[in-house]
Image (spheres, rainbow, N blue to C red):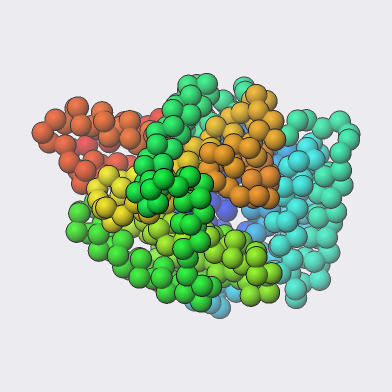
Amino acid sequence: MNLDSRLRAVCALTVPTSRQDAGLHEYDGAVQDLSLDAVRRGLAVLGAGPRRTDPFEEAYLAAAEEALRVRFGELELHRVDPSLHIDVLDPSCYERDYAPERERAEARRTHVRAWPDAVDAAIATLDRVPPPRARAALASARGLARYAEDEPAAQAALRRFVQHLEQAARPGGDVPPAVLGARGLTRLLSAHEATEVDLTALAERADAERDQWHARLADACERIAPGEPVAATMALVLRDHPGADGVVPLAARLVEEALAWTSEHDLVPYADGGCRVGPTPPTRRWEVAMMTAAAPYEADGPGFFGISPPDPSWPAAERDQWLTHYHRSGLANIVLHETFPGHLAHGRARRRAAGDVRRTLVSETFSEGWAHYTEQLALEEGFRAGDPRFTVGVARDALLRLTRLTCAIGLHTESMGTDEVARRHRADAFVPGRAADVATDRLIRDPMVVSYSWGRMAILDLRERARKQWGPGFSLPRFHRALLALGAPPIGLIGAALQEI
């Protein structure tokens, strides 16, 4: 792909996402070098090249450059965060059906055979890993072993990597705190999204929205079971799920329902290409659901929506708890989020975006914010109108994302401890038992979990601005078409949608 020097420099520092989200398969088989020297060299060439003539694309590209400077230069997260190194080692991207199996298998072998050098670099670079980050990364690191079964050198390298994390996971030593601190989190979020973030205001808004969604949830529960406590009704709703062999067939029917409803209401500019539904690949079974769409630089093809039925070898109680993810109304909401009008519709629009910056660079806050916004949109626009169980599903998922936002800010600014994080997940988002206790690991590992709610709120704010600015000319199809034409920009730049012609 003929990308200019500035965009290529960004891609070189974000190889896993450039390969998978943009479809730049010249990176197939390549394991990004995250050694200290390589990252310094990569940062040194950021911005070297001509400015874009399009002001929006220039701002979009400059924001990506600044985000990398903060992530790697200022915060030096590659020295602290093992998940960055796990991402570059992970060859699961070749399981996507974007090319013939033979080509993908060869790329996977080349990738895995590059592990020894990459692991040596990771061990040397990860010199300031706090124990909680190391513990949070161990399961994912060990899970890579399945890719190295026929590669003894890669197996040995992975063992060295896991041993390094096990050592880092032990308490003690002179290491930085596991959290970013208020300044670090502010710098990370502000740089990634090209806007100055007020953490206090963002957390306060999340708390206000939490109260609104709790009220919606309580009203819907009252309609389902008048006079019963909300918690009891929630337990009833969560138990209403298919058996393990019925999850994928139900998901396939729901995809058809979501596509028909989205098309009937003309909610997105593109709802084409088709979508296959099936079990997630064995290496992705830890995910509740996944969506892969044909990336902008790939040959066109249908999306794939994956669902993860519980492993038959699990104890019965664990299988049943896992299946609560797929309670009938909740699965409908997952389908809307992942397919139409959510991620898959967004992916179809990115393929048509004008300009290589819009087609290549992805803000997680925009991407996840859009998909989460479409859940609320479905509720507003009458998907399954009159069914209080669907309202419960949407409200519960909104509460989970808001809880993550509030707790991520509280945890990383050290205004909230781990016990409080677990309590908030149980009380505000109905996260049961042990799952609430381990929620802290995700928030420590990935403070960008704020993306879902933050992005949704930013899109809702812009929608209100569009209503006022466009007046009688406002419509949801016009707004969504203008927004998705931007690609997946930082949310600080989405106001450009209001200047669409």
Instruction: Name the residue at the left extreme.
Output: 472
The image shows residue 122, relative to residue 293, as above or below, that is: above
Along the viewing direction, whichever of 2 and 462 lies nearer the viewer:
462
Along the viewing direction, whichever of 42 and 144 lies nearer the viewer:
144
The residue at the point 81 percent across, 55 percent down is 162
- Left or right: 152 in relation to 354: right
Give the quadrant of residue 277.
bottom left
Can residue 439 be seen in the rendering of this structure? Answer: yes
The residue at the point 61 percent across, 50 percent down is 432
The residue at the point 26 percent across, 53 percent down is 385
Can residue 368 be seen in the rendering of this structure? Answer: no
The residue at the point 82 percent across, 32 percent down is 175
Q: Quadrant of the C terminus?
A: top left
Along the viewing direction, whichever of 457 and 385 lies nearer the viewer:
385
Point out residue 105 in the picture as x, y percentages from the top left corner: 60, 74
The image shows residue 109, relative to residue 126, as above or below, that is: below
- Left or right: 408 in relation to 171: left
Point out residue 281 in the picture as x, y percentages from the top left corner: 56, 70
Along the viewing direction, whichever of 229 and 64 lies nearer the viewer:
229
Q: Quadrant of the N terminus?
A: bottom left
- Left or right: 209 in relation to 427: left
Point out residue 327 in the picture as x, y percentages from the top left corner: 47, 61
